[in-house]
Image: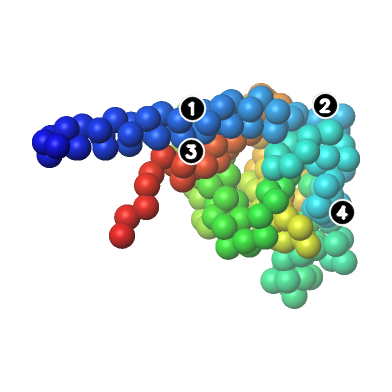
Amino acid sequence: MPSNFVFVKKRKKLLQTFQNVSYGARHRVTLFMKSKLQWLPKPLTYNGMQLKSKWIQEVSGLEGNAVVAFSGPADVPIENMVDLEDVARNAPIYSEAMLHFICEIFDKDLEKMVLRQRLLIAILHETLLEFPQCSKIARRGDDLYDGDAKLSVSIATSSPVSCLIHTGINISHENTPVLTKGLKDYEINPQKLGEEIMHRFVKELSEIDHATTKVRQVL
């Protein structure tokens, strides 16, 4: 059998495998993007108790990996905080109005979830920079700042069955315990921003998932 025939046959088989995998991945991407994010229209107060497994399913009906966004105050007492550095500093979280994101992924790898948290913050930063009035906003780790004014809070943690993220960005800067700025200062609509951030975040996660399915192993 000619060697070029074997090569062509192997190439066709490889392409067919890629096409099958690619179709399946595209289907999962579409399904994930349609059903796994939701804006919660009713304002909610975030007090830290929402950062638990299955809370998203309880309030939205979304099952499995999902992200939701909503607006409302933040009032997290020390006893509900999971950031031990903030607990040691006796620094509870308070804001009269925030845009909140909560994400749950049923994967118990906390390091991977911290990377997803940084991705979410990077997307939030990148999106805000599209507004000319936000040109001075900078990302420092998992926080956003405008000069010395803090815009956001964020944490990633684990539960017995999943990992979770909470990220909040101030809508109002009034009466916060530290110097802050909020979306009102930049005249940005919280719901529109929240929905855009969720779509971009889910798209990135879906594309990451797809990237793991389109390659073959190497020896």
**What secondary structure is marked by label 3?**
helix
The residue shown at (83%, 47%) is 54
**Mark 3 vs mark 1: which is more N-terminal?**
1
Res. 75 visible in picture? no
For the residues bearing labels 4 and 3, Cβ distance under 8 angstroms? no
Q: Identify the image quadrant of residue 9.
A: top left
For the C terminus, the image quarter is: bottom left
Disc nearest the viewer among 3 and 1: 1
Q: How far apart, in angstroms, are the residues tagged by discs 3 and 2?
A: 31 Å
The residue shown at (60%, 51%) is 117
**Mark 1 vs mark 2: which is more N-terminal?**
1
Q: How far apart, in angstroms, are the residues tagged by discs 4 and 3?
A: 33 Å
Residue extending furthest front?
Answer: 1
For the residues bearing labels 3 and 1, Cβ distance under 8 angstroms? no
For residue 114, above or below residue 14: below
**Mark 3 vs mark 2: which is more N-terminal?**
2
Disc nearest the viewer among 1 and 2: 1
Q: Mark 4 points at which residue?
A: 49
Please tell me how crowded label 3 is: few (under 14), some (14-19), or many (20+) other residues with Cα within 10 Å. some
**Mark 1 vs mark 4: which is more N-terminal?**
1
Q: How far apart, in angstroms, are the residues tagged by discs 3 and 1?
A: 10 Å
Give percent across and percent down for residue 149. 61, 50
Amino acid type, callout 2: Pro
For the N terminus, the image quarter is: top left
**What secondary structure is marked by label 1?**
helix
Amino acid type, callout 4: Met
Amino acid type, callout 1: Tyr
Q: Which mark is residue 210?
A: 3
Q: Residue 41 carries which label?
A: 2
Q: How far apart, in angstroms, are the residues tagged by discs 1 and 4?
A: 39 Å
Amino acid type, callout 3: His
